[in-house]
Amino acid sequence: MGRTGIIRDHSPHRVIDIRSAGNVESSPHPIAEKNAARNQLPLFNEISNQSVTRLRIAALLLLAGVLLAVGYHYHDRLTVDEIRMLVDQAGWWGAVLYVGLFVGAEMIQVPGWILITAGVAAFGPDWGYLLSLIAAILSVAVAFLITRGLGGKPLARTQRPMLRRLLAQIDHHPVRTVFVLRLIFWVSPPLNCALALTGIRFRHFLIGSALGLAPPLFVIARTGHWLIG
């Protein structure tokens, strides 16, 4: 007489399904199905990571293009007087416009002292200094992220002895190293790109930049305020 039922094997990967006395079939266990699905995840993750990378590169290129377009559009007007006039005409949006102009102008390497002095002329010594500091930190952060997103970290893998000694300082004392470099080079675009190609973490770069930019920008802002009366 035939039997119909399910007998669970001691193996965690299969269940014996008895349809009849002479016919024994095995059906996949849910755990086995999960394991099979898990084996396919690396390929799925690789495809997903590639898609995310493409989207990230496209977004960075778009951002860089917009900033460059803004910088070149106002290139002939990026003087202290012209920036002050543009900001005054923008009304309540003047601060936003100033920050955008600062970031775009840094992309095309307009001297930072012009932008800082223009901020002081438009907003006064205190607000001008604060806005120029925010804009400077944002500009170096944007340059870092664009360079890191497009170029990766090739300098972190270099084997040249001189570069390895320089990079060791960044690896062991990242915030202090960036702080000292900012005191010397301020918002230098080449410095932003060079640091982005090392293995430094973004938060260390940002903290060191913020701390290192504050003193020289304060001096420039006060000097600019004194010069423009």
Image: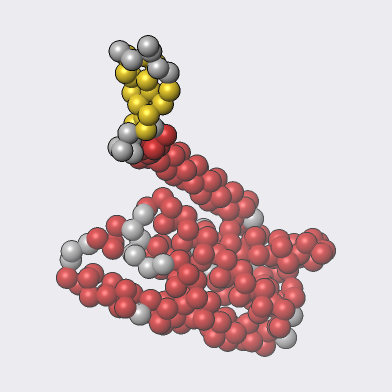
Determine the image quadrant of residue 122: bottom right
| Horizontal side of residue 154 vs 202, given as left or right | left
Q: Residue at x 33, y 19 (%)?
A: 25
The C terminus: image quadrant: bottom right
Q: Residue at x 57, y 75 (%)?
A: 113
| Horizontal side of residue 182 vs 223, given as left or right | left
Q: Is residue 53 above or below residue 85?
A: above
- Outermost residue, front side: 1
- The residue lying toward the viewer, choosing from 15 and 70, is 15
The location of residue 138, given as percent across then percent down, is 57, 66
Count every numbered label the image shows and give the total. Answer: 0
Q: Residue at x 55, y 64 (%)?
A: 139
The N terminus: image quadrant: top left
The location of residue 66, given as percent across then percent down, is 59, 49
Determine the image quadrant of residue 197: bottom left
The location of residue 165, given as percent across then percent down, is 22, 75
Determine the image quadrant of residue 28: top left
The location of residue 227, given as percent across then percent down, is 66, 85
Q: Is residue 82 visible?
A: no
Q: Residue at x 33, y 23 (%)?
A: 26
Q: Is residue 35 above or below residue 23?
A: below
Q: Is residue 139 visible?
A: yes
Way the structure is coloured:
secondary structure
